[in-house]
């Protein structure tokens, strides 16, 4: 059997020209080896793939998500980031190994069905990561056939200890209760991260590890340096929520007398392997610092809006040379894993920053950020484009779908019109992992049944944690906005 495939009859998006010329694609094993006009020469025994009536584009790359969040879809309403963090023990607690596998698989399947072929996933285990938990999460991606950079999301300071003054605002009984939610000590968590990385068992060509100190001021300096050292020793990435909310920005000024990014850079964490998640409250100096070190930002505009974190200045980031990726964030705080929606949110939020149309993000900039920019952020050099020498990660959009009637401009319509329902097939590494709008390797009926069983069990198991959240929420929802009302030298909200 030939190791060659040839895709014929489709149209391939060209971001630069906003066109989609008819293009045949020759694939050997998992790589694109040649593009050409219809009739491209191919070995006589090459597998023929008919893409007639389809628009093809590179698989989308999700710059920031959380696999543990997929069992918590729709559990919150009118939550700020700080309320989300308060709810974490309730909405993400009580997980067994099978739950960690299941929640990751739900997200991976959703991303694939909606045209996303690679993601940077920051997944969480309490009180610290485990080799077994990370393995089942990695295996979920491998089983569905999706690429991932999978990072244990870690810290050594609890949320209530990390926010200056918050613990003192809690009544004594609640102080006692949250003291029991402490994370593992720095030394044991660092050892756990090393154990995960050094005993990685999943094919690193598909799923590879990274390290994610969750929020800088939720980590001691010793812990941040330990994360840095592990990442650099093993040549893997670092990813952190930096300046996501104004609460974080103000807390950093109180704690360090400088921005979170400056604090991390002073300790050597910022480099070409470093991804800032959100970056809403980065200032010009932060952006220049990040650009100078070759760093990246995952721009998660939908999540930023939903959590009320503000509107990131993505245009300024790009002007100063920061590599921009697009992310969905987790389904526990943005409620879906739809990269088409994430792109559209990034477009719209750039428009509401002000009336100067020259500063709005263009559709071509956003589509490039959601493919090539994401690939750079993940540290994977050969994805994000459909071109010779790149992995054959290709999305096939059905041009007979109503999203594409009429077909005017492929780049504009991918960003502004497509919503994931037009995705017909998805290929990863030359293999169809979605065919005729269904995942090839997953039984969706069984997946839904397993999820409902898990949901019911976790609802009972976490009932006391939900009750605790309901007691904590009024304090957090009063104290944190007060902290955020302090003057700051930049403004990222839509109103004053």
Image (tube, grey):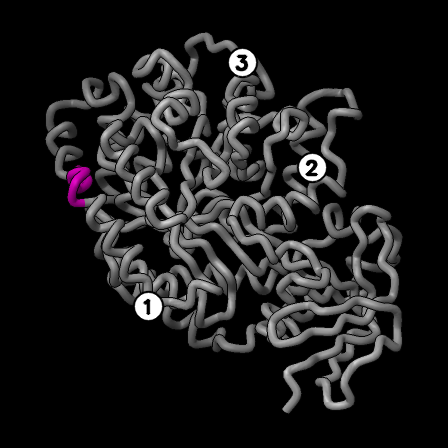
Residue 323 picture location, percent across and down:
60, 36
Residue 485 counted in the magenta span: no
To which quarter of the image does residue 299 belong? top right
Q: What element carries label 3?
A: loop
The answer for how far apart the CA atoms under marks 2 and 1 are is 38 Å
Which label number is shown at residue 347? 2
Q: Which one is nearer the viewer's eye here, 74 or 159?
A: 159
Residue 172 picture location, percent across and down:
11, 24
* 406 sits to left or right of 133: right
Residue 184 counted in the magenta span: yes
Q: What element carries label 2?
A: helix
User: Is residue 72 something that shows in the picture?
Assistant: no
Residue 419 picture location, percent across and down:
68, 54
Residue bearing the label numbered 3: 490
Please tell me which of labels 3 and 1 falls first in the chain.
Answer: 1
Q: Which one is nearer the viewer's eye here, 121 or 14?
A: 14
Q: Relative to residue 287, is residue 71 depicted above or below?
A: below
**The furthest residue to the front:** 233
Which label number is shown at residue 453? 1
Pick the quarter of the image with the N terminus.
bottom right
Please tell me which of labels 2 and 1 falls first in the chain.
Answer: 2
Residue 481 picture location, percent across and down:
40, 19
Which label number is shown at residue 466? none
Magenta residues span: 181-188
Please tell me which of labels 2 and 3 falls first in the chain.
Answer: 2
Q: Is mark 1 on a helix, strand or loop?
A: helix
User: Is residue 8 something that shows in the picture?
Assistant: yes
**Which residue is painted at 16% across and 40% down in the image?**
187
The answer for how far apart the CA atoms under marks 2 and 3 are is 22 Å
Question: What kind of secondary structure does the magenta stretch mostly adopt?
Answer: loop
């Amino acid at each position: 059997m030939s190791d060659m495939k040839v895709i014929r009859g489709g149209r391939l998006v060209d971001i630069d020209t906003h066109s989609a010329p008819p293009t045949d694609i020759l694939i050997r094993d998992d790589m694109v080896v040649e593009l050409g006009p219809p009739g491209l020469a191919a070995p006589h025994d090459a597998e023929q793939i008919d893409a007639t009536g389809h628009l093809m584009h590179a698989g989308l790359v999700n710059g920031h998500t959380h696999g543990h969040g997929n069992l918590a879809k729709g559990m919150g309403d009118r939550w700020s980031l700080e309320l989300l963090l308060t709810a974490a023990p309730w909405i993400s607690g009580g997980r067994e190994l099978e739950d960690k596998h299941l929640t990751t698989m739900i997200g991976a399947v959703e991303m694939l069905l909606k045209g996303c072929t690679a993601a940077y996933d920051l997944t969480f285990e309490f009180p610290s990561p485990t080799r077994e938990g990370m393995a089942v999460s990695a295996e979920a991606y491998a089983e569905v056939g999706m690429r991932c950079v999978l990072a244990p999301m870690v810290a050594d300071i609890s949320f209530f200890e990390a926010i200056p003054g918050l613990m003192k605002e809690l009544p004594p009984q609640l102080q006692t209760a949250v003291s029991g939610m402490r994370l593992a000590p720095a030394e044991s968590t660092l050892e756990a991260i090393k154990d995960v990385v050094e005993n990685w068992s999943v094919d690193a060509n598909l799923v590879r590890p990274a390290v994610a100190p969750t929020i800088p001021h939720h980590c001691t300096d010793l812990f941040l340096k330990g994360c840095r050292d592990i990442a650099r020793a093993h040549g893997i990435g670092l990813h952190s929520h930096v300046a996501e909310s104004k609460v974080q920005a103000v807390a950093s000024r109180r704690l360090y007398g400088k921005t979170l990014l400056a604090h991390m850079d002073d300790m050597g964490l910022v480099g070409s392997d470093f991804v800032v998640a959100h970056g809403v409250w980065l200032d010009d100096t932060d952006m220049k610092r990040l650009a100078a070190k070759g760093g990246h930002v995952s721009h998660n505009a939908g999540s930023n809006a939903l959590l009320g974190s503000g509107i990131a200045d993505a245009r300024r980031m790009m002007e100063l040379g920061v590599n921009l990726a697009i992310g969905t964030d987790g389904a526990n705080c943005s409620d879906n894993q739809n990269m088409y929606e994430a792109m559209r949110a990034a477009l719209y939020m750039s428009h509401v920053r002000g009336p100067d149309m020259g500063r709005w993000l263009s559709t071509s900039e956003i589509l490039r950020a959601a493919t090539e920019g994401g690939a750079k952020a993940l540290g994977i050099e050969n994805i994000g484009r459909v071109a010779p020498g790149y992995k054959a990660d290709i999305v096939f959009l059905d041009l007979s779908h109503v999203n594409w009637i009429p077909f005017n401009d492929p780049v504009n319509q991918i960003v502004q019109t497509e919503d994931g329902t037009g995705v017909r097939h998805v290929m990863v590494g030359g293999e169809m992992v979605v065919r005729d709008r269904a995942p090839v390797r997953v039984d969706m009926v069984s997946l839904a049944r397993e999820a409902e069983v898990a949901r019911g069990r976790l609802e009972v198991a976490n009932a006391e944690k939900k009750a605790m959240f309901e007691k904590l929420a009024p304090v957090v929802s009063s104290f944190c906005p007060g902290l955020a009302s302090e003057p700051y030298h930049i403004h990222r909200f839509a109103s004053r």
